[in-house]
Amino acid sequence: MIRSKTRCTLAAGIIAVLLAASMHECKAQVTGVRTNLPGWAALSPNIGAEVAFAEKWSAGIDAICNPFKWTEGRSSQFWQVQPEIRFWPRHKFAGHVFGIHGQYGQYNWARTDIRYNGYYYGGGLSYGYALMLHEQWNLEFYAGFGYNRMEHRNRYDRRDEEICF
C-alpha cells in the first residue's frame, strides 16, 4: 500500500500537472491556486488548483493531509482529495459560486485503547462567495453539504501495525 507521504506528493503532483496544462494562458482569471486557512490552523497541510474551462465554469481539485502522530497512542492521520466543478453566475473567480464535488480519503484515528482505520468516499453540493481583494487575490467563503460513506475496521489494539499509513 502507498505511504501517506507518497499520497500527499502524488496529490501535489496532480495539481501541478493541472496548472502546467493551463500555462499557455496562466492569468489570474483563468487559473487559481488556493489553500484552506482553517485547515492549516488544524495542522493539516492543503493545496488546491482551479482552472476555468468556459466563460462561467471552472474545475478544480483540492488535496489535504495530516500525516502527524500527536502522542503515544493518539493520532488523527488522514488524507483526502476533492475534485469539483463550479458555476459562477456573473464572473469567473468573483462573486457567488455553486459547485458539485466528490471526495475520497483514508483515515487512521486512534485513542490510547482503540483505533479506527479505513476509508471514505462521497459527494455533495457547495456554495461560496469570492471577494476580490485585488486583481490577483481573492478571499473565498465557502460551505459544502453532502454525504460520505465511511468504511472502517475498528477496535484494533493500538500496538497493531497501521494499515492505511
Image: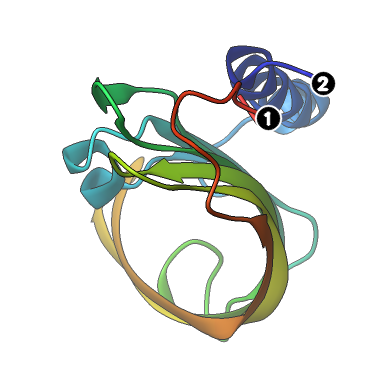
Which amino acid type is shown beneath numbered disc 1?
Ile
Secondary structure state at the residue bearing disc 2 = loop
Q: Quadrant of the N terminus?
A: top right
Residue neighbourhood size for the residue with mark 2, other residues' Cα within 10 Å, grouped as few (<14), some (14–19), many (≥20)? few
- Tell me the residue at 43%/45% (across/down): 109
Q: For residue 52, which quarter of the picture?
A: bottom right
Q: For residue 35, which quarter of the picture?
A: top left
Where's residue 138, x and y in %? 31, 52
Q: Which disc number belongs to residue 52? A: none
Q: Which residue is mark 2?
A: 1
Q: Are marks 2 and 1 in contact (CB under 8 Å)?
A: yes
- The correct choice, above or below, for 54 with respect to 97 in the image is above
Where's residue 96, x and y in %? 43, 82
The disc, 2 or 1, on the residue closer to the chain's N-terminal end is: 2
Answer with left or right where residue 127 lies relative to residue 18. left
Q: Which residue is mark 1?
A: 163
- The correct choice, above or below, for 18 with respect to 13 in the image is below
- Tell me the residue at 42%/67% (across/down): 94
Picture mark count: 2
| Residue 57 seen in render | no
Q: From the viewer's side, name the closer residue of 55 and 75.
A: 75
- Tell me the residue at 25%/21% (across/down): 72
Q: From the viewer's side, name the closer residue of 43 and 74.
A: 74
Where's residue 153, x and y in %? 66, 54
- Tell me the residue at 79%/56% (across/down): 53
Answer with left or right where residue 87 lies relative to residue 135. right
Answer with left or right where residue 154 lies relative to residue 104. left
Q: From the viewer's side, name the closer residue of 83 and 77.
A: 77
- The correct choice, above or below, for 45 with respect to 105 in the image is above
User: What is the CA distance from the residue labelled 2 to the residue labelled 1?
Assistant: 8 Å
